[in-house]
Amino acid sequence: MNISENDLLMAFKKNNEIFLRKIHLYLNEAYRNLIYNQDEDQALNEMQICKLRYIENVWIENEMVDCMNRYDCSRPIHSIEDAADVLAGHPVFQHPLYSYLRQEASLEEVKFLIWNDSVLNLEFFDYLILAMVGVSEPVRLEIAKNVWDEAGRGCLQQFHTILFRRILARLGMHYDRYEVVNQMSWEGLAGINLFSYMSLYQHHKIKYFGVLAATEMLDPPHYLQLLTGFSRLRMSAAVNPAYYQEHAEIDIQHAGSWMNKIILPELSRCPEKISDFWLGFYLRLDSVQRYYDVLLKHFLTRKAA
């Protein structure tokens, strides 16, 4: 895929959705190659890597400058309550998408959400593994506990990716990453790309911890509402909702552990990195808000038609 200077201008200066989607499709495919490709003949060459570096830098600089202009990324953080206060004040908190899913959404709309979430849900385990690279043993131990939970605590049938694939199968959906990605909005693609970018570069480690902390804190209240929607639609009998129940419960524990055993100790050791943490935290919140906004708009537009 050819990305021109005009494409970058239209995407990041003009906010043109066609060009934003084109660029995020390109980034998603490039990151997929870097993380998962095992065929040497298909690996990115030096010229392609240089191209990727240039395009991703234009994208992420645009995102970070916007965040720094809108949020106080130097604010102190002493406990998880400080992060919880920030989350509670952000528009993504208790997003109306999940009120809609709880109260009004049809089965097809719930399936559409699950389908759009599928790439990140099925690849999250790998992103957790990447978080362990280059960190201290105490931090690695805490991340390993999260990984153990994702791995079903030693039970293959409780492995979170298996639980999620089972939901897809019971809803009559066959997972095809290419198919999912090629129907996603740019907002959804950008959310996956944020994980890929932050996880691949060690100098963004604290930012990446901010991305992960925001995710662990944001999911439980939303998933509780989704589970209520499952019950309303009488899906629970046909679809085992264990994947969402697990995340609604254990992510609360994970969020506390991330903050108390990873982030606060790391910031105590490197206080100059506090802005990196908040930058990652806000980048994730903004990314999820855009994604939820476009999903809700899709549902409401179709309903009004």
Image (cartoon, rainbow, N blue to C red):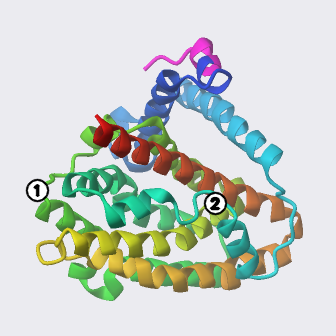
Horizontal and vertical percent position of residue 276? 77, 58
* Neighbourhood count class around disc 2 (C-alpha, 10 Å): few under 14, some 14–19, many 20 upward: many
Task: Tell me the residue at 67%/85% (across/down).
Answer: 261
Pointer 1: what residue? 172
Per the image, the residue denoted by label 2 is: 208
At 70% from the left and 80% from the top, the residue drawn is: 80
Residue 91 position (above or below residue 64):
below
| Membership of 76 in magenta stretch | no
Q: Going from the N terminus, do you reach mark 2 or mark 1 first?
A: 1
Q: Which mark is residue 216?
A: none
Percent of width and height locating residue 289: 55, 51
Q: Is residue 174 left or right of residue 152?
A: left
Taking the magenta stretch, the answer to whether it contains residue 7 is: yes
- Left or right: residue 300 versus residue 73 is left
Q: Is residue 298 visible?
A: yes
SS assignment at label 1: loop
Residue depicted at 62% across the width and 51% down the height = 286
Magenta-tinted stretch: 1-9
Q: CA distance from mark 2 to mark 1?
A: 34 Å
Q: In which quadrant of the rendered view does residue 180 lie?
A: top left
Nearer to us in this view, 298 or 257: 298
Closest to the observer: 110 or 284?
110
Which residue is at a point 68% across and 23% down the rendered structure image? 13
Classify mark 1: residues with Cα within 10 Å, few (<14), some (14-19) or many (20+): few
Quadrant containing the C terminus in the rendered view: top left
Disc 2 residue type (three-letter): Tyr
Q: Residue furthest front?
A: 304
Which element carries disc 2, helix, strand or loop? helix
* Residue 11 percent location from the top left of the image: 59, 24
